[in-house]
Amino acid sequence: MDLKVIGCHGGETPKHRTSAFVLDDRLAIDAGSLTSGMELRAQCALEACLVSHAHLDHIRDLATIADNRAQNGCKPLVVAGTKVTIAILKKHFFNGLLWPDFTKIPSAAHPTIEYLVLKPEEATEIAGYKVRSILVSHTIECGAFIIEGKGGAIAYSGDTGPTDRLWEVLNETPKLKAMLMEVSFPNEEHRLAHVSGHHTPETLAKDLKKLGAGLAKDLPTLLYHIKPSFQAKVERECARLRGVNLTVCALGDHFIL
Ligand SMILES: [Zn+2]
Ligand SMILES: [Zn+2]
């Protein structure tokens, strides 16, 4: 599997982009920077986008990628998420007010985007992968994804604080190659992390212990969603953790898994 990091931060500056990743050039995972971080041709090559939850930093570039794809006659982009997430996108985002309803543009018969509702824990075929959504613990409904391809699986957690079910499922997932995991705030901001449903290095380290014996030490854990204001501090705190295999994602990273 070929994983490109398009955006990996919990905020934006000219040096930081919000969450978006692309698998094998055809499956996007969250849409925080799909247009600010990708050329038109790559935008058009995408077949589907998994949306972890409806917070703006994970969906905002769905607006601009829909616009770009409509002008270039690209195939419909499948936008997949849980029922709650898709309902928010329809009602509050592509609602004909904040942004046009691209399920009817250029026409209902040839739409720019198509919604796909994912039932938690049920496998769905998307862009040639078997995808399962597992609910995690955030301020609104938010999912993780287990994405299984021919050679193995990767996991992606959307925004979350301490959670349980995801780790249970990961313990039972064969051929798990890597996990993309959020960490947002430094340890001293634990109150803010708690009320906003995010991890600090300390809470993440505790959660990683829920992985079965040896798995946390070996499983490549790719960290994203650090808030730009706290980048250096969170990186230092993560570097001090032991018994884990952590890499902090950077813009432009390209992993072959
Ligand atoms: Zn969020
Ligand atoms: Zn976020």
Image (cartoon, grey):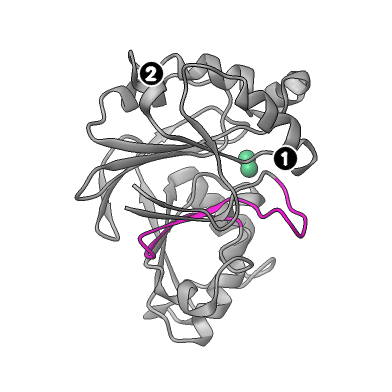
How many numbered discs?
2
Q: Amino acid at mark 2?
A: Leu
Q: Secondary structure at mark 2?
A: loop
Percent from the top left, x then y, of residue 42? Answer: 46, 73
Percent from the top left, x then y, of residue 6? Answer: 55, 58
Earlier residue among tags 1 and 2: 2
Q: Amino acid at mark 1?
A: Lys
Residue 80 visible somewhere in the drawing: yes
**Residue holding disc 2:** 211
Q: Where does the magenta region start and end?
A: 11-32
CA separation, marks 1 and 2?
25 Å
**Residue holding disc 1:** 227
The answer to whether residue 205 is left or right of residue 135 is: right
The answer to whether residue 111 is left or right of residue 139 is: left
Quadrant position of ligand 2: top right
Taking the spot 65% from the left edge, 69% from the top edge, the residue there is 99
Q: Residues within 10 Å of mark 1 (few under 14, many from 20)?
A: many
Seen from the viewer's position, the closer of residues 89 and 53 is: 53
Residue 200 visible somewhere in the drawing: no
